[in-house]
Image (spheres, rainbow, N blue to C red):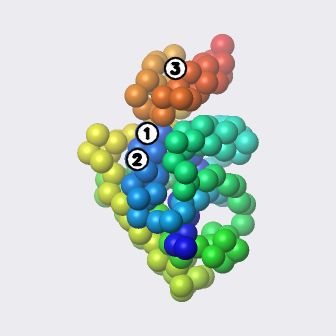
Amino acid sequence: MRTAVYPGSFDPITIGHLDIIERASRLFDQVIVLVSRNPDKSPFFTVDARLGFISRAIAALPNVSADAFSGLLADYLKQRKATAIIKGLRAVSDFEYEFQMALANKTLDPAAETIFLAAQAKNMYLSSSLVRQIGALGGSIKGLVPVEIENDIQTALQEEIS
Ligand code: ADP
């Protein structure tokens, strides 16, 4: 049983994230999408809200599940006997940070491999923060987030300005 963990803030999950999840689900027996705490960021959505959005977006993928963890990723990997960390790479801007994280995780858990999947060209400039900005300013986020959760995310972001 090969298990991979796809960690991130997912604040909220976008179609860029979902594309990486679908591709990873074809490479591994089991994929866990992990809402993990990033000490450098203060999230907009609560962990429960982010998990709820992810669960609805992955409902059609039988070997994908969602979870949350606030400790070290290396500890979570050992706990779940996962052997791979999935990361999506967009432009060069992701590279430096993700490379640093991959090296740190390799030191903390030498058995785990970080696997980078290249973003699709159409998702290259898509980020959760872009979705939050567009939504909070009253713009449509249609096509940027999974269709099942589009309305709920749009409403939640719009409530912020009203
Ligand atoms: P973090 O707060 O750790 O950066 P994110 O939720 O922003 O978490 O991203 C999680 C992972 O998904 C990262 O590996 C990131 O590079 C990747 N990712 C984010 N947006 C996209 C996208 N549009 N296409 C492909 N991968 C993406």
Which quarter of the figure is the N terminus placed in? bottom right
The amino acid beneath tag 3 is Leu
Could you classify mark 2 by the number of other residues whose Cα lies within 10 Å: few (under 14), some (14-19), or many (20 or more)?
A: some
Residue under numbered circle 2: 19
Q: Nearer the viewer, residue 91 or 51?
A: 51
Residue annotated with mark 3: 137
The residue located at (63%, 69%) in the rendering is 73
The CB of the residue at mark 1 lies under 8 Å from ligand 1: yes
Q: Is residue 63 left or right of residue 119?
A: right
Callout 2–callout 1 Cβ contact below 8 Å: yes
Residue 15's mark?
Answer: 1
Q: Judging from the image, what secondary structure is the residue with disc 2 in?
A: helix
Q: Earlier in the sequence, mark 3 or mark 2?
A: 2
Disc number placed over residue 135 in the picture, else none = none
Please state which amino acid type lies under the numbered disc 2.
Asp
Amino acid at circle 1: Ile
